[in-house]
Image: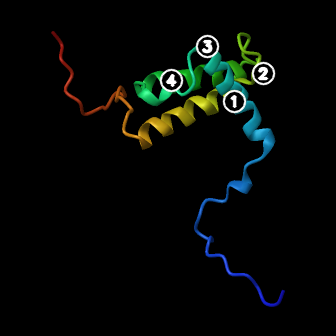
Amino acid sequence: MTGQTVKHDRDKPDYALLTKDMLEPMVRALMFGERKYSRFNYKAGFKNVRLTAAALRHIMAYNAGEDNDPESGVSHLAHAMVALGMLLDNQANGVMEEGRYVPDQTISRT
């Protein structure tokens, strides 16, 4: 073989940057969710604040010294990453329901 093969992929996502140590705990968290709810149940959409709250609960538990979720046995960090991934998926697919507080919203005080 002579010369160099050309591949125009410089600006494409480089999934090779992801590692097994990053992805496997996330997949385990997703598998737990699949058993508890159903596969891809999140694809129907969630209110964004519910997924944000779930991610933050896992981050706070981790920050308080608890490495793994007691129910699933899977890393709290993986659960948080999965919740944020679901949020990104819902947003990208137009099924995210807005629930965030926006400071300039008119608030009804009835």
- Mark 2, Cα crowd under 10 Å, few <14 / some 14-19 / many 20+, is some
Q: Is residue 38 above or below residue 16?
A: above
- Spatial CA span between label 3 and label 4: 10 Å
Ranked by sequence position, the earlier of labels 3 and 2 is: 3
Residue that appears at 68% across and 81% down? 6
Ranked by sequence position, the earlier of labels 4 and 2 is: 4
> Residue 78 — which label?
1
75 or 57: nearer the eye?
A: 75
Question: In the visual, does 78 lie left or right of 100?
Answer: right
Ranked by sequence position, the earlier of labels 4 and 1 is: 4
What element does badge 2 sit on?
loop
In the picture of the structure, the residue carrying the numbered disc 2 is: 67
Amino acid bearing label 1: Ala
Q: What percent of the width, then of the height, locates residue 19?
A: 78, 46
Q: What percent of the width, then of the height, locates residue 70?
A: 74, 11
Amino acid bearing label 3: Lys
In the picture of the structure, the residue carrying the numbered disc 3 is: 36
> Residue 4 — which label?
none
In the picture of the structure, the residue carrying the numbered disc 4 is: 41
Amino acid bearing label 4: Asn
Q: What percent of the width, then of the height, locates residue 31?
A: 68, 24
Label pair 1/2, CB-CB below 8 angstroms = no
What element does badge 4 sit on?
helix
62 or 48: nearer the eye?
A: 48
- Spatial CA span between label 3 and label 2: 21 Å
Q: What percent of the width, then of the height, locates residue 98?
A: 34, 30
102 or 45: nearer the eye?
A: 45
Residue that appears at 70% across and 29% down? 77
Question: Which one is in front in this view, the residue at disc 4 or the one at disc 2?
Answer: 4
What element does badge 3 sit on?
helix
